[in-house]
Image: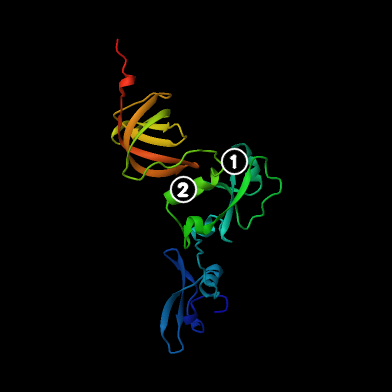
Amino acid sequence: MNDILVAKTYQGWEVASAPFWENGRKYVTVISPKGEERTVRVYSEREYARMYSGEKQYKVFKTQKELLGFSKGYITVFRGNTYPYKEWFKENGARFTRSFKWSFDSDVEIPEDIPEGLEPVRVEWEQVGNGDRLKTDDEIKRVMDNIFYASVDSLSEYVGEIGDRLEITVTVNKAITFDGYYGTSIMHIMEDGDGNVYVWTTSSKSFPEGKVVTIRGTVKDHREYRGVKQTILTRCKEIVKEEDIVVD
């Protein structure tokens, strides 16, 4: 059976028939040294090699750490406006992800001709990952916002402690309307005289941008957004002072 490839169990058995096809597969009848007759599969060279080459095939799975380019424990991201330089990044082997924007893997050499206005910053895996997996989206966003917007020149500091009731006079810098699960809401981004930033989202009140208003509200949280510290307020109420009342 030198030219007929059968399972190793039947090699050395006498061939008792010519190969034949059945249901799309090739077979042959063989007889054992003890006279046992059996019909067995005949394999192609490719099938036989796959079965008996001794080379087991394993599918290699990469971890999130490896897939995102942290093979040496870090990647390099860029602080600054990267949008005009998309082609430069592509040509030099950078990758773009939602969390890290344009970045170079740790095993990719960073070009020397970095565009003006961009600052390379190394992100260590320990900052964004646990073991071989990424941290939560919120945790990564906080880390990356601190990196991308670290150079933001802001006077804002956190005001009060969570749960404190504050009375402040602020200017409404932005009033952003958006539709949510409970209907239309307005996010007020406000600033006091010391440059501290406050955010109040409500569906019951809408202040126009540029309005100076005195409000009383409860500190819900302290967050940092794009390098700016923000005091998040809830249950706010406009305070109208006597001197603000106009009598006709």
Q: CA distance from mark 2 to mark 1?
A: 17 Å
Q: Quadrant of residue 123?
A: bottom right
* Location of residue 191 in the rendering, given as x and y in whole percent from the top left corner: 43, 32
Q: Amino acid at mark 2?
A: Arg
> Where 186 falls versus 128 (above or below)?
above
Instruction: Say which residue label 1 marks.
Output: 80
Return the residue nearer the eye: 34 or 72.
72
Q: Amino acid at mark 1?
A: Gly
Q: Across the whole image, how many numbered discs are drawn on residues? A: 2
Q: Is residue 6 left or right of residue 72?
A: left
Q: Residue at x 45, y 36 (%)?
A: 196
At label 1, counting other C-alpha atoms closer than 10 Å, the crowd grade (few under 14, some 14-19, many 20 or more) is some
Q: Residue at x 53, y 70 (%)?
A: 50
Judging depth in this view, the residue of 154 and 166 nearest the camera is: 166
Q: Quadrant of the N terminus?
A: bottom right
* Residue drawn 49% across the image and 83% down it: 14
Few, some or many C-alpha atoms within 10 Å of disc 2 (few <14, some 14-19, many ≥20)? some
Q: Which one is nearer the viewer's eye here, 206 or 87?
A: 206
In the displayed orientation, state which residue is furthest to the right: 112
Name the spot of residue 216 as percent of width and height, x first: 31, 33
Q: Is residue 83 above or below residue 10?
A: above
Q: Residue furthest front?
A: 243
Q: Residue furthest bottom?
A: 34
Q: Residue at x 50, y 80 (%)?
A: 8
The earlier-in-sequence mark between 2 and 1 is 1
Find numbered disc 1 in the image and state the secondary structure of the residue it sits on. loop
Give the left or right position of residue 181, taking residue 151 as reference.
Answer: left
Residue 142's disc number: 2
Residue 175 at least partly seen? no
Q: Residue 13, relative to residue 3: is it above or below?
A: below
